[in-house]
Image: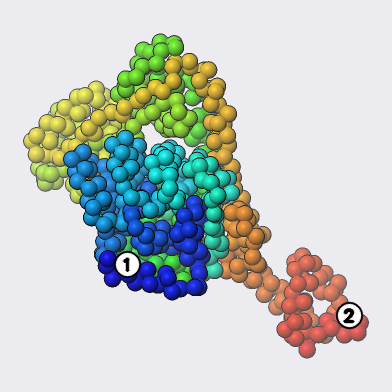
Amino acid sequence: MTNTLQILKTYWNHTTFRTPQEKIIEAVLNTKNVIALLPTGGGKSVCFQIPAIIQEGVCIVVSPLIALMQDQVDSLNEKGIKALALVSGTDQDDLIALFDNIRFGNYKFLYLSPERLQSTFIQEKIKQLNVNLIAIDEAHCISEWGHDFRPSYRNINILKSLKPAAPIIALTATATKKVIEDISMCLELKDVSIFKKSFYRENLAYQFFNTEDKLQRLIQICTKTKAPIIIYANSRNRTKEVATFLNANNFKTSYYHGGLTPDHKQRSFDNWISEKTPIIVATNAFGMGIDKSNVKVVVHIDLPNSIENYIQEAGRAGRDGKKAFSAVLYNSNDIRISLEKIKSAFPSIQEIKSIYSSLFQNYQIANGELLADSFEFNLLEFCNTYAYNSAKVDTTLKLLHNNGVVDISNNYNKKSTIQFLASSNQVLNYTKAKNTSSTLIKLLLRSYGGVFEQETKINEFWLSKKIGILSFKVVSILEQLHSEGIIDYKKATKNADLYFLVPREDDKTINSISKNITKYVQQKIKKSEDLLQLVKNNEVCRSSQVLTYFNENSISACGMCDVCLHKKNAYSNISSNIIAYLKNQKHASSHQICNHISSTEANVLVNLQHLLSEEIIGINHYNQYYIK
């Protein structure tokens, strides 16, 4: 056993003081099932790593992101603790060798995604392991009421049947009471212990700025901040636009979103971590597993989708315990379009029925028929054939998947990539020819930025519509350009595999799940409304509003959010006006002061009490105030 393991065991056995994390560890060591809510940066990993290390056997960790898994595996290995991550693309022979290493090589951690857990081969291999603990990271993904629902997380409870004796610890940074109940029910946890650390962050100021010129306010924030910054935006194009704007104003900035190639993502991430570009503009794809302690400011230049999203993203600031800020920039237009956007994103029940019926029509499946075969599915071709909005078809497929009506592989919207290999002069000469290849190259150059520097995702179907040829012809031209060394073209390897899980009954099937769908959509809309309420409520401390949302008894006002600061300034002005009035009048009753000061009676009386307590003013036998 390594020195690290021995130190941990010694520490645990001789420590009586228990932090919240240590209380969680103690419950796990007593083989209790645990749901732990710890805010972003609250030390969730240690809650399963320590009990796993000081017991015999291996801990299985279910995690949603490959990058997050690999980071934790690398960190453990650096400390002399053996850990492996089971990534996609590993063939069966390698899997056999990997599991043999875990069984006989004293490995302590096996990280895998919920999707990999569905493999019957991997399930059989897990049965052979001595499992001391099952840890589920980002457990809010289990719940359809959570803000980051992933259908594959609903099947994690297979681990309970594979290893019934192993305790389960489910960890998340944000969850409401409903989400906690859903996690417990889905995982079938009996006698579960729930640990919840307060969401109160005493060093983090939530500040909301109503501003028409967001970019100018952003310049002010970036100028004042001499530490790393995260700026969240709601669209991929927006991240690039804002980063370009900041770079043009001499701020070293990179951008990050889910549509970038793995190399581009890694480069942006590394440049930000190393502070080569201390500012990063990102969608919420830049999220789980981001652990940089000296982030000073997190800015939302667009409104987040929910309070859960907001708290998780804002919570990436100030992890070093020093004062940090969350700045939300909004205006009346943001509030107006926010609800419109979420309502328009979800198809109606009638639209779902129409899309579902068209799926059967597309594959010529008769009423009452159920075929075990899979069908190749291309989202864009399907939408073009039946004139559907692709976003609504995408949402419909997810809803049908979540309700067990269809099963579809998650690469149906996977895109091909290109990168120009020839020099810009060579490409320019190529475009001088008057042919379809030249037209396509010009369109690529106009439509996609960075095609000379990096792999860039493209949409062949969209390109074909823009230049008026069939999509297979676009593919043929791209393949020819690839063979000539002009571009590197990587075609998306296959369409999605679509399985129908119930016989064709069209409206009857959708009617049976319509209540679930309606409830899910209403929940999403409610989360958006709750976020807007937080934005618009300028009377109650922001921190208090957040705590109330997460079912915590609100503490006193934080004193540093925009609401509290505004009140402080208002009270300061009122007190100054009271003092000036009394200097002029020598003495006056509260009624006279209230009539003179432009504020509410309640505010004036509070300020009078404050000035009395500070002995700046006094009160005589006639209940008149005077300067002391």
Mark 2 lies on a secondary structure that is: loop
Residue 118 drawn at (x, y percent): 35, 37
On screen, 236 above or below 597? above
On screen, 134 above or below 24? above
In the picture, measured across the screen, residue 2 lies left or right of residue 319, that is left
Residue 390 visible in rendering: yes
Q: Residue at x 46, y 61 (%)?
A: 25
Q: Residues within 10 Å of mark 1 (few under 14, many from 20)?
A: some
Residue 301 drawn at (x, y percent): 46, 54
- Whether the residues at callouts 2 and 1 have beta carbons within 8 Å, the answer is no
Residue 471 drawn at (x, y percent): 24, 25
Residue hosting label 1: 5
Mark 1 lies on a secondary structure that is: helix
The amino acid pointed to by label 2 is Asn
The amino acid pointed to by label 1 is Leu
Judging depth in this view, the residue of 318 and 499 nearest the camera is 499
Residue hosting label 2: 623
Q: Residue at x 32, y 67 (%)?
A: 5
